[in-house]
Amino acid sequence: MSPRHRALEILLQPDPALKAGAARALHEAMSPLWAHGGPPTETGTEPATAATLPPGWRDEAIGLSPAQTAAMPGRPPRPALVPAKQVPSRSPFTLEGRAALLHAICHIEFNAINLALDAVWRFAGMPTDFYRDWLRVASEEALHFGLLRAHLQTLGFDYGDFDAHDGLWGMCEKTREDVVARMALVPRTLEARGLDATPLIQDKLTRAGDAAAVGILDIILRDEVGHVAIGNRWFHHLCQARGLDAVTLYPQLVTQYEAPRLRPPFNEAARKAAGFTDAEMAFLLGVD
């Protein structure tokens, strides 16, 4: 089975712990292969330690059965998904409020596993590095989910105990036919918002006395800079390959797909570390 087919299987897995474990296992299983220069060519000889992949695995258009379409993406019965405006805002300075805040981040990380796996199976004909990058992202998002869920459990709560919204997966659905739009609007728009929000959340958690949660968010922020950088890398790669101007295309995609127009404050240092150009930062800041 190719890593793209396996990514689809994991995406359809509804159990969060099994999904997270399988995402990490798939990345680990593929790592020796990537380390030896990538999958073998159809005429070349792969290293002895590399797994053998089916010919044409990158270029295969993978279709969904009706049952798979109905099960997409795999997720548990809880949390209940409600419109974003119906998710209540609670003070992080109460135990329940802090748990609700951490639950919201945990839900984002669960969705981020799905988003990365979806990029792997859905978009055919991409370079090998594309699939390697997004399998790595899926594995790291699975780690984040596990860390947050375990911490929630120490507070007497679990994933699913609070309502959540489906904004991230909604944009994934909107961009399912266009890999350029996907790279523009999911990793480097919706997920990049975490670069801005995380330091503010850490400040609240510090004042609430939750040093463990702050430490987990340090790990997440470090890794998310890399994830947004991957989105930036592939957005610019695709624009260059297709003769598109990335700076002028981005606002067009925001309008076309009704993506949120992000507002300050921005974590400019993290965004620049993730590959945002001066022109892109100027657009975000509303500078002509």
Image (cartoon, helix red, strand yellow):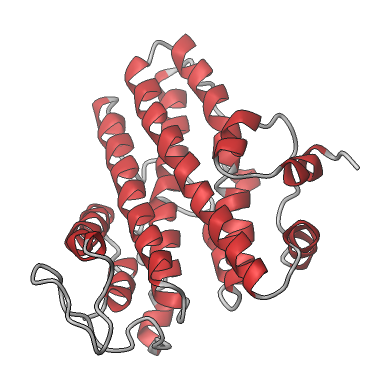
Quarter of the image that includes the C terminus: top right
In the picture as drawn, the residue positioned furthest to the right comes out as: 288
Single out the residue that lies furthest toward the front: 44
Q: Is residue 39 above or below residue 275?
A: below
Residue 248 shown left or right of residue 194 in the figure: right
Asked where in the image residue 273 lies, by quadrant, the reply is top right
Which quarter of the rendering shows the N terminus?
bottom left
Residue at image point 28% right, 54% down: 16
Q: Nearer the viewer, residue 57 or 218?
A: 57
Toward the viewer: 165 or 252? 252
Whether residue 235 is visible: yes
Q: How many marks?
A: 0
Residue 65 falls in image quadrant: bottom left
> Which one is in front, 144 or 31?
31
In the visual, does 247 lie left or right of 180? Answer: right
Residue drawn at point x = 52 percent, y = 16 percent: 203
Residue 119 picture location, percent across and down: 45, 68
Check the image and report above or below for 227 versus 131: above
Which residue is at 61% across, 37% downward? Answer: 272
Q: Residue furthest left?
A: 48
Q: Position of residue 194 (x, y in %)?
A: 55, 38
